[in-house]
Image (cartoon, helix red, strand yellow):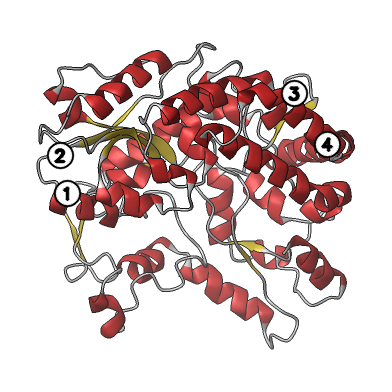
Amino acid sequence: MEADFADWVEAGLLVDVAPYMDRYTTMRDYYNSIDPGILFYASESDGSIYRIPGDVAEPACETLWIRQDWLDNLNLEVPTTLDELEEVMYAFTFDDPDGNGVDDTYGLGGDGYDIRSFWPWIQGCGDGLGRDTFVRLEDGSYVYGPTTDDAKEWLGRVHKLYADGVITPNIVTDTDRDEEMANGGFGVTYNWVIYNNPSNGTMQSFYSTNPDAKWVPIDMVAGDNGNPQDEPASVGAWCYFGITNVCSDPERAYAIWDDMAQPENYVRRRFGVEGRDYIDNGDGTYEIINAGDGPENTEQNLGIKLFQDLFSRKDEYNIENSAETAELFEKVKENSRDAYEHTIEKKDPSKYVVNNELGTDIGDICKEYMWGVISGSQSLDDWDQFVSDIENAGIQDVLDELTELHTAQMKEYETYMAEHGGE
């Protein structure tokens, strides 16, 4: 919707809320405490702000999970390298880790048709640049990750694992990772940190049918590059909101919005009433009684999770996170910063005209080939032809545009952070 947003701004359909942020500071101060770059990506070059960040992800949201009970059953140690991880996955597949005498287990599972399910290999092969997107190098130049030798390496390793039956077969189709996690049957996954919370519905569903199982988060394994990294998340919000020009009192609307973001108000509308919906244990931890996902909330109109994407705190007022989960978020954040240095975020994607014209076709060629190699329907021997197809689709023109526009954006970002980085 970036093009639509640009049209709305040009047509004067949205209200500039930057002046209101100086008077009602809850949201502004929160975002600056997380990362001043959040408001950089929300603002225009003249400092106006027509889109208010809604839900902004933690700097890193996922971690490597493993079945500790399966490790114990097979007398295996927690893997620390990519090679060791693969050895464990083969054992989980073929050595009957659940002890039921049935060939019904797999090493790796994850969200279907989602390349990030293979993040341990992506980050661990070569220099970790083989992502399914564009990557910024240390010298300021840009490459298309899927055409790098790093991508060829991790594709080859994952293809072998899939061909050997070590990865769940349905990972090459569009399946839901939460459902797959709840169903079990595999022993390794790269998945959400929030699974660590006792109130997490996916894990509660899993343990209801697997009471003796034990999923645990572990450190990212090291590949040949010796720099294990978790996957960084975007600094920009994944959703934005705006106040339209037909609002009779936009300042009052923003003031209410900002007041809803106050810690005590946020806790009330996100988690409900203390004693009824959650218990304060008095030691900085909380027990969630009513997570808000069931009929009790909807049928009784309790209002838990009311406007949850309007503004979502990821600090201590997100009381759903246990102390251990908060520490885990911090750990994966710190362990993703080197990878984030190569991440490209576009402040105004609508300006990337060449990419918007050619990007879909290039992406389709990439997805068809990469998933084809993983599933075995295409061969890694055709790598040179794949790279040629990407080149013929106009990848160099896209890279030239990216170099020009994103380099200019990074200079603008550096200026912004010099002015606001200490806020």
Q: Identify the element where label 4 is drawn.
A: helix
Q: Quadrant of residue 368?
A: top right
**Disc 3 and disc 4: Cα gap in Å?**
15 Å
| Contact between labelled residues 4 and 1, with CB atoms less than 8 Å apart | no
On the image, the x and y values in percent for residue 380 come to 62, 24
Residue type for callout 4: Ile
Q: Nearer the viewer, residue 3 or 392?
A: 392
Q: Position of residue 77 (x, y in %)?
A: 23, 16
Secondary structure at badge 3 equals helix
| Marking on residue 213 | 2
How far across and down, in percent of the image, does residue 332 sit? 43, 32
Instruction: Please determine whether, in this image, residue 30 is positioned above or below residue 78.
Output: below
| Marked residue nearer the N-terminal end (2 or 4) | 2
The Cα atoms of the two marked residues, 1 and 4, are separated by 47 Å
Q: CA distance from mark 1 to mark 2?
A: 7 Å
Query: First in sequence: mark 1 or mark 2?
Result: 1
Mark 3 or 1: the one toward you: 3
Query: Which residue matches tag 4?
Result: 395
Q: Amino acid at mark 1?
A: Tyr
Q: Nearer the viewer, residue 408 or 167?
A: 167
Q: Is residue 217 left or right of residue 315?
A: left
Counting from the top left corner in percent of width and height, residue 10 is at 87, 70
Q: Which residue is mark 3?
A: 384
Report the quarter where the N terminus lies. Answer: bottom right
Distance from the alpha carbon under mark 3 to that under mark 2: 45 Å
The answer to the question of whether label 1 and label 2 lie on touching residues, with beta carbons closer than 8 A, is yes
> What residue sits 14% from the left and 54% below the top?
208
* Residue topped by disc 1: 207
The amino acid type found where label 3 is placed reads Asp
Residue 315 is marked as: none
Q: Mark 3 near mark 1, Cβ–Cβ under 8 Å? A: no
Q: Nearer the viewer, mark 3 or mark 4?
A: 3
